[in-house]
Image (cartoon, helix red, strand yellow):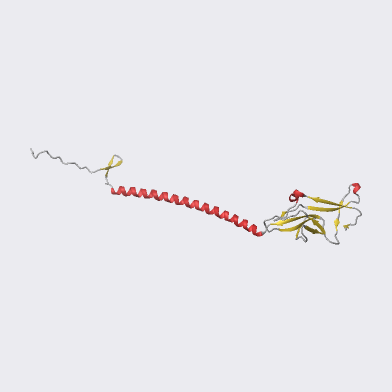
Amino acid sequence: MTSPYIKRLAIVYQNLGNWSSHYYSVPGHSFVTPVVGFRVYDASNFIFSVITPMDLRVTGDPISIHFPQFMLPSGLNWTAKCVTFNIDGSVLLANMTLPNVCSTRNQGHFSIVVEQPKREVRKEWKLWRWWVGAIICLLVGLVSMGLVCILLVRHTRAKKIRKMERKADQGESFNTIWVGASKMPSAAVTRTQPILENGYVP
């Protein structure tokens, strides 16, 4: 029944096909069938190009929307649901009463969507966290190796300097004298006493 009552009505059907996701979307879900729909119009004055949208009241059994080519993707535990996009902009999710069939008591657009199981989402989240942890550990390891290399180089240099200082302390020390404004090392004077070739002393 239409509200208000009219003698002639026009039912416009739509099948959005590949454009379904362009016009409609359901967060956390993906379409597995095209979005189809219908709308009722007052066609009493159709010859004068006057078409007015009408409200529709279903008094008996609900309207059935069949999706004969609907098939669930294989390999995962998918959950299929019927989605209704009402004229007022609201979105309604409901379970299918019959295989490949959705029911409604209002005009609008309809489709079947699936939601990926939550365990798969948790698995992807764990995998992402594992990669982040591995990258952080790698960066920490590289920084640690760099610090160890720097400490080894400093230790080797300090060891060489201490060795050189030890050798300098073990060597012969020289006295120092001032020559003008400069301080210079000076060795002690040791002179070899002359010895005659014979014991004759004049």
Name the one closer to the observer, 160 or 174: 160
- Quadrant of residue 131 in the image? bottom right
Which corner quadrant holds the N terminus?
bottom right
The residue positioned 73% from the left and 58% from the top of the image is 80
The residue positioned 36% from the left and 48% from the top of the image is 161
Pinpoint residue 114: horizontal percent, then vertical percent.
71, 56
Pinpoint residue 142: horizontal percent, then vertical percent.
50, 51
Pinpoint residue 153: horizontal percent, then vertical percent.
42, 49
Horizontal relation, residue 150 to residue 47: left or right: left
Horizontal relation, residue 125 to residue 19: left or right: left
Horizontal relation, residue 47 to residue 99: left or right: right
Name the one closer to the observer, 29 or 87: 29
Pinpoint residue 8: horizontal percent, then vertical percent.
90, 53
The residue positioned 53% from the left and 54% from the top of the image is 137
Name the one closer to the observer, 81 or 10: 81
The residue positioned 44% from the left and 50% from the top of the image is 149
Total number of numbered labels?
0
Which corner quadrant holds the C terminus?
top left
Name the one closer to the observer, 168 or 179: 168
- Quadrant of residue 105 in the image? bottom right
